[in-house]
Image (cartoon, coloured by chain):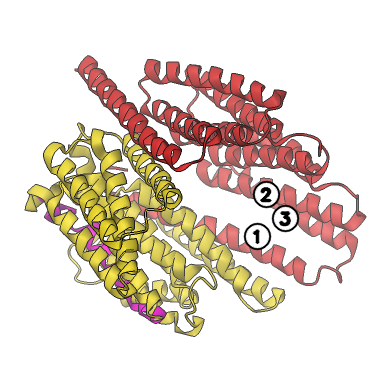
Chain colours: A yellow, B red
Amino acid sequence: MNNPDNHSSAQPSLPIKIISIIGGILSSCAFVGFLFIAGIYDSALAQLIFGIGFIAGAIWLDKQYNTILLDTISISLFLIGGILIGIGLSEFGVSETLTYLIFIAIAALSLYLTQNQVLALVAMLSIHASIIAIFFSNNQYEVLLIYTPLLAVTCYLVYTHSSWFVQQGGKLAQLYPVIRTASTLSFLSALYLLGIRMSTPISPQLFWIASVGIIGTILYQVNGLYKQFNPEETSPPIVLLLLITLLLLPTLFAPAISGAILIVLLGFQFGYKTGFVLGILSGIYFISQYYYDLSFTLLTKSILLLISGALFLVLYFFLHKKLSPNEN
Amino acid sequence: MNQPPSLQDWSRFVRILLLTLGIGFTVAGIIFFFAYNWDALPKLAKLSITGGLLIATTLLSLRPQFDPLIRNILLTASAALVGVLFAVYGQIYQTGANAYDFFLAWTVFISIWVLAANFPPLWVLYLLLINTTILLYADQVANHWSDKLVFTILFLVNLVALIVSKVLLKAGKTIPTWFTNLVALAAISFSTIGITTGIFGNQDPSFWLLLLLAALAYAAGIWYGLHQHSIFYLSIIPVSLIIIGSAWFLNISNDAGSFLFISLFIIGSATLTIKYLLDLQKKWAHEQS
């Protein structure tokens, strides 16, 4: 499982990409300020035409030059184009859902046309944001409970199939790091929607639906790892899987926590530092938020925490005893 | 982290994860427990339980049988417990202290551990405490300090931490890059926020001082970046300058034309920066080969 990042030493480094993204976002904000003050709202048709023109310009710049040098301007054009099209469509009285579907189509088309990593990332994240916006604008918040585990499975597949992407060659191989970043960020953002209290009006009693999918993905990953280290065995002992399920069971109503655990494990397994660190930071946040939100008395909370703490420590000492002699 | 982890890497990772979670949950559980029947506990019990826990964690961290990383995690937990102990003490005896006193005491009392352990996450906690102490002091005691002065001080503190880390690094100490990058980001965020606030507000002497210090630090940062081939410093400084420049233009005029100009200014300056950095990267790669 080679890390495809390493093959491309000629690639511009991360800080440079971040400058282009920050620059693109800041300049499109300033441009939106310009639009507001100048009051270019008179003609919806003009907004649409300019919007499409801007996005076409962004893609044309990429096709023509595909250099990180022009990334700032192409991201800017892409975002401003999207905003203009959105305003234009709403002036025409197009429904929100249709507007987001058009966004998805535009982003997918851009993705199909562009070779550019940064623009591809922005396009993929726009698709994800539009999908969520469709759920929310139609008050179908509960779909998030299905969508989030689907993103977990997507992340798992993207992380585990890096060699497949590289073998496909061409654009898929070239865009692999971007696909991985986009799937991680999309999954994390969905987790934040579930993890932050009151950010969605989903009844917490339904959260287990998302957890089942995510915990299932973790178990599948453990299964794969077990087979990797014990090639002669077909499946891990049922006790191991049961133990992991038992450990994850307290997070049944907090899918954000098991989701963060999945990202941390995948990040560790495939040496993806950004995902690993984001997963740990989000995990700490989700756990704190979860205990803060529990509507138990402090005594019940403290007992729950102490029991889980003791369980982790027991497991730690058990593993320590079991594994230490082999290592020395 | 580029090689796929071996079975040993996994077992080490899982053990550290379990230990961290175990210690974290247990400490949190104990804190919650006290919080629940806090009023019912006698004073001595409150202090001795917190103190006992602190001593136990510290003693455990001294056990040479443990992995150095695990000992450092334990010591970081005891550094956190020092804060809990001060909070308990302050609550029992109603010392009437300001919140900043509490953070100051916490900072001072863990100094020796921080120095002795020399564990980067503990240093992060330490710097966080110093920054919090300054912020609270400015808020509760030094009300007359302007925002600019507070940001100047915060900028200076983090800058000094960064310079000291770099000097130590040069002297052969191992300091992870993420640590120096984090401190540099903190410092440059404070200078950027301070200068931007100053541009939109009134420009008192501390604003000019911050401007001067930032100019010197940015110049030194660019020199360092060029000298050490570090794209990181050569990226964050231009981003800060672009934000400051945009704020400056916006302060001069905020009509439609100036927003359009700022939009173009950001695109232009970011593109120029990227071009310059790409050329540099090429040049460095060329020098190496």
The residue under label 1 is which amino acid type? Val
Q: Secondary structure at mark 2?
A: helix
Q: Is residue B156 visible?
A: yes
Q: Mark 2, residues whose alpha carbon is within 10 Å: few (<14), some, or many (≥20)?
A: some
Which disc, if any, is residue B27?
Answer: 1
Q: Chain of mark 3?
A: B
Determine whether label 2 and label 3 are within 8 Å by CB: no
Q: Is residue B60 left or right of residue A90?
A: right
Q: Is residue A50 left or right of residue A264?
A: left
C-alpha gap between disc 1 and disc 3: 9 Å
Determine whether label 2 and label 1 are within 8 Å by CB: yes
Is residue B185 rendered magenta in the image? no
Query: Which residue is under mark 2?
Result: B80
B126 relative to A263, above or below: above
Q: Disc 2 vs disc 3: which is toward the camera? A: 2
The residue under label 3 is which amino acid type? Leu
Q: Chain of mark 2?
A: B
Q: Position of residue B138 (x, y in %)?
A: 76, 38
Determine whether label 1 and label 3 are within 8 Å by CB: yes
Q: Return the disc, 2 or 3, that comes first in the chain's sequence.
A: 3
Q: Nearer the viewer, residue A218 or B206?
A: B206
Q: Is residue B90 left or right of residue A48?
A: right
Q: Position of residue B105 (x, y in %)?
A: 79, 40
Q: Nearer the viewer, residue A12 or A167?
A: A12
Q: Residue at x 45, y 68 (%)?
A: A193
Is residue A147 rendered magenta in the image? yes
Which disc, if any, is residue B53?
Answer: 3
Q: Which residues are magenta?
A: A140-166
Q: Residue at x 61, y 36 (%)?
A: B200
Q: Secondary structure at mark 3?
A: helix
